[in-house]
Image: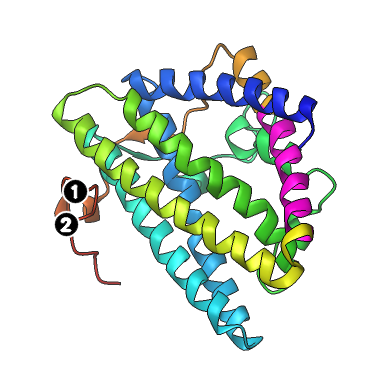
Amino acid sequence: MNLLTQVLHLVGSGAVAYITAANIRDPKSRPNLLAGFQLAESGSVPFLEALSKRAAAEGDEWLSERLAKHAQDEGRHGQIFAHALKQLNKQVIDFKSLPQKPDDGKPDERRRSPFFEAYYEGYDVKTMFMPDRIDWLLFMGSTYILELDACKDFVRMANALPDDPISLNLKKGMISIAKDEEGHAAYLREAMQRRLGYAKAEALITEWRTRKVNAMIAMATNLLQKGGQLPSMARDGVPSELAENPTKFNSAGESTTQPVAA
């Protein structure tokens, strides 16, 4: 990573860190941030499960096992954020009930992400990102950077939370998530090195780090233009399954609640 990229990385990371910390501290904006995290974590589970099956079919049991574990972790992360929303008497909005375009005819901001538009610039996400056809190195390189940075981001946000009992439970959960993300980044880095060797793997990582820097700047610019306000992602109410099966965490940030049977 060259000097300019390093500087931009610091600037972009700092801007995003400030905005996310402010939003998670603020009781009014916290639900939208948590809802976004729940959608991202839970939404990745089917994709990772399908990738695990594909790796097994291709004879890579090592990768298949780690992808399966990754999927399980993301499902648990989604439960953590869903429970945090439940404690605020909120839940994720139902996107299926929303019109494709609001009355003003403009695209719904909640359906697009300036970050991912910039991160995957040049790739046709709709056709290239299917689990049965995505290039393994594209998946590994792009996901590695996201997981590596996520572990730091979640720790930073956890430390920004206030000290009330509800926030303390969320803090423990986010610390637990950060540990998982660190493990995901480690296996993805090893997976790249297994296929490419050390030097080429590092070159791929640098490519996606540069993309992440550009994407963070795009996201920060978009948020600053909106005064740091996040799109509305949460609505009032609590899903019945969460009301019946609350999630709690021990002092190490580990869930002590058994998952709901499928």
* Residue 237 in view here: no
Pick the quarter of the image with the N terminus: top right
- The colour scheme applied to this rendered structure is rainbow
Image coordinates of residue 31 in percent, x first then y, are: 36, 30
Neighbourhood count class around disc 2 (C-alpha, 10 Å): few under 14, some 14–19, many 20 upward: few
**Amino acid on which disc 2 is placed:** Thr
**Amino acid on which disc 1 is placed:** Phe
**Residue designated by label 1:** 249
Query: Residue at coordinates 58% horizontally, 19% vertically from top-left?
Result: 15
- Residue 28 to residue 166: above or below: above
Inter-mark Cα distance, 2 to 1: 5 Å
- The residue tagged with tag 1: helix, strand or loop? loop
Query: Residue at coordinates 17% horizontally, 56% vertically from top-left?
Result: 245
- Residue 12 to residue 225: above or below: below
**Mark sitting on residue 219:** none
Image coordinates of residue 2 in percent, x first then y, are: 79, 33
> Which is nearer the eye, 256 or 36?
256
**Mark sitting on residue 256:** 2
Q: Are marks 2 and 1 in contact (CB under 8 Å)?
A: yes
Q: Look at the image and give the residue range highlighted in magenta.
A: 200-216
